Amino acid sequence: MCNNEAPFKKENGEPYLEVHHVLPLSEGGSDTIKNTIAVCPNCHMKFHYSAEKMNLRKTVVSVIKRLVCETGN
Ligand SMILES: [Zn+2]
């Protein structure tokens, strides 16, 4: 989302990112790559708590083609 590098590397050397479900599992979203993105911790919390979170959801679905909008809108 922010185009920054992951904030740190894990002990195994891999960059630390968090998995976000674009449509929450609690709203019927799937646990597949059609509904998930890897984001930094700041962006992840923005998706959950920002006043703009519904706009962020729409933007990411339109920009990342593999995401399938599972709400149908
Ligand atoms: Zn970010």
Image (tube, rainbow, N blue to C red):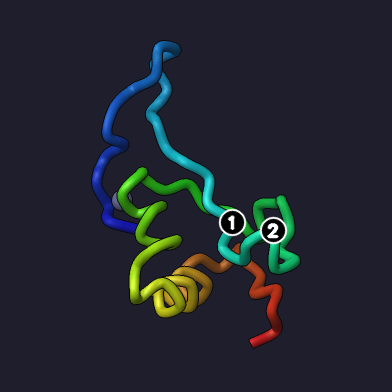
Q: Quadrant of residue 11?
A: top left
Mark drawn on residue 25: 2
Residue 37 versus residue 71 in the image, above or below: above
Percent position of residue 62, x then y: 49, 76
Identity of the residue furthest to the top in this view: 11
Instruction: Work out whether 39 lies above or below 5.
Output: below
| Residue type highlighted by circle 2 | Leu
What residue lies at 63% left-to-right and 62% top-to-bottom?
24
Do callouts 2 and 1 mark residues in contact (Cβ within 8 Å)? yes
Q: In the rendering, which numbered label is found on residue 21?
A: 1
Instruction: Measure how far apart labels 2 and 1 are at the Cα level.
Output: 7 Å
**30 sits left or right of 52 in the view:** right
Q: Is residue 65 left or right of residue 31?
A: left
- Is the CB of mark 2 within 8 Å of ligand 1? no
Q: Is residue 9 above or below residue 25?
A: above
Which residue is at 31% across, 36% downward?
A: 6
User: What percent of the width, then of the height, locates residue 25?
Assistant: 69, 58
Q: Residues within 10 Å of mark 1 (few under 14, many from 20)?
A: many
Is residue 52 or residue 33 the one in the foreground? 52
